[in-house]
């Protein structure tokens, strides 16, 4: 079974976000939570640095941060959290069941550690990879945590370049 696929979650304004509505953009998908002490901030900093390196081409990239802790990550908290890293990062959430379905579709996972004992101080074990989707919404690769920025940039640009080239060829073929 192929990984990936369309999904619908909720953005921080309470509006539905449908992956299918963002065809044409390269999507960077990350599952995390605002209380994460290390991996999430590191990868959101990577998002920020990547976007800066891409310059005007960043408009073809949509970095997503999907909170897998809907009980504690309020829309306001999520908005403030991602804005701290970059205004270009879009935060999403949903019900625990919906988040589980989306994570499983991409081969990701998460689980709550200690929530049965303390609903305020539990942690969340979660996949710490970035899922790279091509402009057609298909999974183009999984970028493991700790991949150097230069390699992440190379992989994103490899997906961006064919998309730009194919649309130019399409326009040229219609002109003849």
Image (spheres, rainbow, N blue to C red):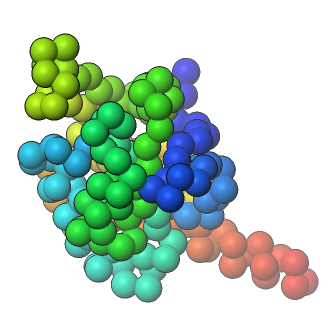
Of 121 and 1, the residue lying toward us: 121
| Horizontal relation, residue 31 to residue 175: left or right | left
Residue 13 sits above or below residue 55 on the image: above
Residue shown at 53% from the left, 43% from the top: 9
Indicate the position of residue 23 as horizontal and vertical percent values: 64, 58
Residue 84 sits above or below residue 96 on the image: below
Q: Is residue 152 visible?
A: no
Residue shown at 13% from the left, 15% from the top: 117
Number of marks drawn: 0
Indicate the position of residue 102 as horizontal and vertical percent values: 48, 32
Quarter of the figure that contains the C terminus: bottom right
Quarter of the figure that contains the N terminus: top right
Residue shown at 83% from the left, 76% from the top: 173
Q: Is residue 66 visible?
A: yes
Indicate the position of residue 21 as horizontal and vertical percent values: 66, 56
Residue shown at 16% from the left, 31% from the top: 120
| Horizontal relation, residue 9 to residue 91: left or right | right
Indicate the position of residue 45 as horizontal and vertical percent values: 19, 64
Residue 93 sits above or below residue 26 on the image: above
Q: Quadrant of residue 121?
A: top left
| Horizontal relation, residue 142 to residue 163: left or right | left
Of 173 and 124, the residue lying toward us: 124
Q: Residue furthest right?
A: 176
| Horizontal relation, residue 34 to residue 78: left or right | left
């Amino acid at each position: 079974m192929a990984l990936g696929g369309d999904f619908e979650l909720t953005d921080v304004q309470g509006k539905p976000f449908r992956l299918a509505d963002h065809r044409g953009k390269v999507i960077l998908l990350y599952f995390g939570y605002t209380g994460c002490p290390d991996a999430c901030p590191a990868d959101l900093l990577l998002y920020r640095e990547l976007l800066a390196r891409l310059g005007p081409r960043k408009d073809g990239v949509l970095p997503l941060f999907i909170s897998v802790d809907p009980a504690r990550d309020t829309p306001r908290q999520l908005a403030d959290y991602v804005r701290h890293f970059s205004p270009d990062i879009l935060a999403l959430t949903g019900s625990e069941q919906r988040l589980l379905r989306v994570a499983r579709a991409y081969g990701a996972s998460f689980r709550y550690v200690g929530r049965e004992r303390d609903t305020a101080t539990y942690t969340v074990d979660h996949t710490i990879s970035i899922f790279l989707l091509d402009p057609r919404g298909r999974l183009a690769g999984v970028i493991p945590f700790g991949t150097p920025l230069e390699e992440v940039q190379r992989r994103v640009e490899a997906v961006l370049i064919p998309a730009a080239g194919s649309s130019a060829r399409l326009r040229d073929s219609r002109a003849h």
